[in-house]
Amino acid sequence: MKGNSIGEFEELVLLAVGILKDDAYSLSILEELKIRTGRKVLISSVHKVLSRLETKGLLESQMGGASKERGGRSKKLYTVTGYGIKVLSESHELRIGMWNAMNEANLGLG
Amino acid sequence: MVSPPKILQSILRKLCRDEFLESVEGDLIALYHRRHEQRGKLYASIYYLLDVIQFIQPFFLRLNCNHTNADMYKSYFKIIFRNILKKKLFSGINLLGMSLALGIVMATFAFVSHESSYDSYHSKQDRIYRVTYRYNNQNGYDISWARVVQPWVNELEEVFPEVEKLVRFQSFRPRNVKIGTNKFREKYAFSTDATVFDVFDFQFISGDPQTALKEPYSVVLTESIAKKYFGENQPLGEAIEIYNDLGEQETHKVTAVIKDQPSNTHMPVNFLSTINSPEERAGWAYTYILLKENAKIQSVEQQIDQFIADRVEENPEFLTYSFQPLTDIHLHSDLSREIKANGNYDYLLIFSLIALFLLAIATINFANLNTVQLLNKTREIGIRKVIGARKANLKFYMYLEAFVLTMIGAVVGAVLFWLLLSPLENFVGYQLTFNHGLLILGLLAVVVFVSLLAGVYPAQVISGLQPIFALKGKLNKRVGSKGAKTFLVGLQFAISAALMSGTLIFQKQFQYIQNAQLGYDQQQVLAIMDIPNEVSDSYETLKTKILEIPGVADVSASLEIPTRPIKDQGMVRISGREQDDDNLPSADIQVIDINALELLNIQLVAGEQLPQSIKNINKKLNESESIDDYMQSNRKAYLLNETAVKLLGWESPEEALANEISWSIGNIRLAPGPVVGVVKDFHQESFKTTIDPLVMTYEPIWLRQVLVKVDSDNYFRIVDRINQQWNDLFPDIPMETAFLDSEFEKLYQSEQKQFVLIAIITVITVFIAFLGVFGLISFTVRLRLHEMAVRKVLGARFMQIFQVLGKEYILLNFVSMLLTVPVVWYFMNDWLENYAYHIEIGPIGFGISILSISLILLSTIYFQTRKASIRNPAEILRND
């Protein structure tokens, strides 16, 4: 875990990219996050995090999917890299492990 | 397909880095479209703007400056702030001067913009005009009225197609109101037309503007009046009793409540009641017309003379009508019987001018000190150049420094203004309305302007600097074009001297007016003001009752109290003299009870006071009789003032005695009677205006003010006792009292206030100017420290050093003062012409200001030189 820790928001964005699969780009990620978390998310912070995750090698991107609604501009479509999947699952395992430990401790006490 | 505002798109394209641009742009356009569909264009555009702003952060920005540049700016700011902290004297003087100046400039802006915003809140203000008239004949009778009386004025609405609506405001005298057992006396309680709300903007809290004044005997209250009458209870539908001009109670129903008007209106309103019948829609009224859209007032003006000529048989040319644009009334009107006191345009100009001077002085200080400070900065600049700063960078640095200092000054000034605002509002007596956004924009504009001015010279010098010289701490040019600096300092001296001597002359004139003897004794006189007919009918009874009160010396009555202008000017006929009926001489009328002269201590110069017998002859008006017959049959005796004697062509007061005269206004003619006495001229109004010719007589139905002379100090008890007597006699009528000496003080109140404000600003201006000069001198002394040390070593005495250092400033001071005197003399003379009685400008005001300015200057130079000359020259020279 040491060295490649990611923040909570980064993790959520990464997961959203995974959920959206072929249509993961900034705006759809924003919508996904809004629906799932109910939080207000700024479009600029989504862009910022996506770019940061790409620099870290957790995401990779390609341009495509221009439409009339976007005034002919392409989307930057993201996919989670293998390394990204690894980081996600490590984080998930860490949490599960800790969750179980907590339950056991509390049961033991009870 | 719709698209976001082009300009915002191009801003985004300029700012955002290429790697993000495509996808960000696409996202924002998509969001724009979605919002456009849901909530419309404006909503989408506003959110688009907010989105663009989101992306203005270093992460996305296309910074054409690389890291070194960012560091450069960081270092600029760091050094600027360090310099501010290090050079405490320099930055202190600049900041103090700049913040004081900007604070006062802001206050002046607030005041001036309040004064010039009168009535502009009415949405149809550009189409509303007030109808006023002027009556003048060739013989000096000349009055312009703010209200009109001609019965045919109502026809304007039907005759002129340009006029959409005509609205009258009648019953402008204070009205008596009764609610249950509570009595009130209300000013600004007009009766008006139902269409008033179509013309003027009143904000309705409850009730309907369309129907509020439709039914007769309706009344619309303002919020604060509703609270005063009904407390927290709902006023709608309640009944209030309003007394009409004949003293009869009329029950009115409250149909609406409106918000209190803002303070910037020439026509304050407490309540509006209905005009209840076509017959009532006559007499004196403040009359306003609303033009149709696109109609021109000029076309009404062109035809108005014909309109009048068609309706007036005798001498229509004596009567002129004019139409005042609604928003001009407050500053440019000043006619007889304005609804409330007008503003003074001249004072606005004076205040703006002084504020401008103040700003100029602060800017000059700043520019001068900034320039001399360059010498301290040469090493820093030299190093920056060696490291590779470009000319443009350094220029920018100089402007940036000026801007930062000015900006800090502006922030402190804004805080100062914010703290000053409520004391200022208390002082002037009303809330100031002004546009906050405009104020801030204006302040920013001033800041940019000042920093450009203060930065331009240093920027020029710096960019041409040779690094070699600079590193030695020297300039290859002489700092500051000497001519410019001398001129600017001279200008400061001149402005200081001008403001100071101008203020002193103002103060002397003001003192002269205030201390002038008005010709009567206003001390310890209580006035019961504006009594209605009912009371004046029983005046003699009231008088007997009040005289019974211990501490009351005498009771009398008059038509108008001294201090308030008499606007009843009428024609004087002299029996047995050939006179042109169309051009009779005219004089004011003052009606008095016989003993008023004694009570007010007005001196007789010839003859005697009105005979007691005249009081017995004069009977009361009975109901069957017309006012004309009544007036004609009541025998009279007259008093004149000295001015009237002269006007009527008699050589001496004695000559006037025993002549028979009569006085008439319109159709009302007083019966002829002998002139029994001549009184010494006294000032009915303030000392600012000339004394008008005056005719005095006794006429019981025209007594409107009761005057009570008190010879005890226990005023409250006496007023209380008078109130009791009054309530016994007239339980339904409220009583309004005032002391004459406080009315007298009110005459000069606005002048007094303006004087205090001008004096304060002048003192601050002179103070700031000297701060600047002080800074400049102390800097010069420091620069020439070596020179002084050498001189001292060579045997120069203190006075010689003083001379060397001070010569320039002292000479400059005298030259600029001498140039100031004629300019100030010219302008102040012009201003004094506004006063009927004024002082002559003497040398004293100039003397005092020149002397005190020179004295401050000399002592500044003296102390600075002393500080320098006390130091051991060895210590100074050792450093070389």
Image (cartoon, coloured by chain):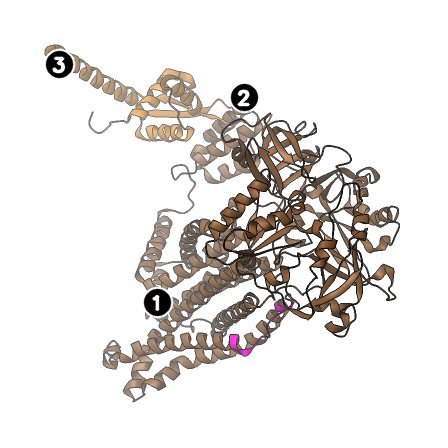
The image quadrant where one finds the N terminus of chain B is top right
Q: Mark 1 — on which chain does it sit?
A: B
Instruction: Tell which of A43 and B417 is nearer to you.
Output: B417
Name the mark on residue A105. Answer: 3
Q: Is residue B837 magenta?
A: yes
Q: Position of residue B260 (x, y in %)?
A: 56, 38
> What colour do you see for chain B?
brown
Instruction: Tell which of B167 and B814 is nearer to you.
Output: B167
Q: Mark 2 — on which chain does it sit?
A: B
Q: Is residue B698 magenta?
A: no
Q: Residue B172: in sight, yes or no?
A: yes
Q: Are marks 3 and 1 on the same chain?
A: no
Q: Which chain does orange denote in the image?
A: A
What's drawn in magenta, residue-wise?
A: B832-845
Q: CA distance from mark 3 to mark 1?
A: 72 Å
User: Quick one: label 2, few (<14), some, or many (20+) residues within 10 Å?
Assistant: few
**Amino acid under label 2?**
Gln
Name the mark on residue B376. Answer: 1
Kindly state the secondary structure of the residue where label 2 is placed: helix
Q: Which residue is mark 2?
A: B38
